[in-house]
Image (tube, grey):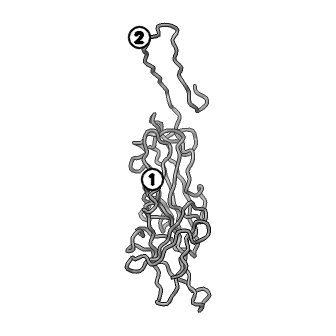
Amino acid sequence: TVTVTDNYYAVVSASEGVGPTGIYLLDIDISDSVAPTVASLSGLPDQGTTSSNVISSLSMTFSERMDPETVLAVGAFDLREAGTDGLFDTADDATVGLVMQSNFNEFSTTISFFLESGPLDDGDYRFTIDSSVSDRASNRIDGNGDETGGDALVRTFSLDLPAAFVLEGPGNNVIGGATPIPLTEDPVASGYLTAFGLGSQDPVIYKNNWSDPDYWSFEVKAGDIVRVAIDTPNSGADPYVELRNASDQNVQSDDNGGPDSDSLTHGY
């Protein structure tokens, strides 16, 4: 019985009979009865916690290579919001679409998803990996860590995002789906208005950096001066921003005008 997970090697030599006729067939049989587990799950808050983080993607690594037929099956992964009744598996649940970032095959151990509708809003959520997900020896996943396969991995969490921010809406990659963002005058009667949006850049294809333009809409009057700043705390994004008019024409843009690699337009 193997006691340590590692690479092992079969070393073949010949005591006699070498030469052109010394051909052999190596046959290795392994009896795998160990249930696979999720070695890591990133992008989601810890079980039972409440977070103010922006959640727009998730990634997991299995303890071993998995059977792609079970991993890619419909229903293998489920992310849903409880809805207004605060309960899961009722009529008002809202299912969150998951979009795979890359291919998954029989040699893969990691799978990553973007959230189809963009970052999650405030609410109670549950992520599930179905108990049918299996390794290549048909051992079903040990989702609860009891060293016995056949149980789902379930993680519940809540989101409570900062009230000052408007969350990026679904379908805002075109001007017609722009997320409206209200302006607030602060201080009152100062003529200085601000608005804050919270979004994420999620190119479906790695390094396809221009595939997820996010449109935000706001109303300004003739004579107003508009500045747009993009801040990327705790992010690997190098943002680029354009100020566009109602005809979707670029009137001003910036790449690295702000701190570090952030963007800042200088008034239009």
> Residue 65, image x and y in percent?
49, 39
Disc with the residue nearer the chain's start (2 vs 1): 2
Label 1: which secondary element:
loop
Label 2, residues with CA under 10 Å away: few <14, some 14-19, many ≥20: few
In the displayed structure, would residue 138 be above or below residue 158? above
**Which disc, if any, is residue 156?**
none
Question: Label 2 vs label 1: CA separation?
Answer: 49 Å
Q: Residue at x 56, y 68 (%)?
A: 256
Q: Nearer the viewer, residue 178 or 72?
A: 178
Which is more toward the observer, 198 or 33?
198
SS at mark 2 in the image: loop
Q: Give the quarter of the image for residue 190.
A: bottom right
Q: Residue furthest top?
A: 16
Task: State the count of labels.
Answer: 2
User: 105 or 191: nearer the eye?
Assistant: 191
2 vs 1, front mark: 2
- Callout 2, which amino acid? Thr
Q: Image point 55% across, 57% down: which residue?
A: 44
Q: Which residue is mark 1?
A: 101
Q: Can you name the residue that lies furthest to the bottom here? A: 189
Q: Quadrant of the N terminus?
A: top right
The residue at the point 54 percent across, 76 percent down is 265
Residue at the image position 56 percent from the left and 85 percent from the top: 193
Q: Tell me residue 95's x, y (percent).
A: 43, 60
Q: Is residue 14 above or below residue 90?
A: above
Q: Where is residue 68 shown, x and y percent of the image?
A: 42, 42
Q: Amino acid at mark 1?
A: Gln
Q: Are marks 2 and 1 in contact (CB under 8 Å)?
A: no
Image vertical order of residue 176 relative to residue 27, above or below: below
* Crowd tier of the residue under label 1, counting other residues whose Cα lies within 10 Å: few below 14, some 14–19, many 20 or above: some
- Percent coordinates x, y for residue 35 in the rendering: 52, 37
* Residue that label 2 marks: 21
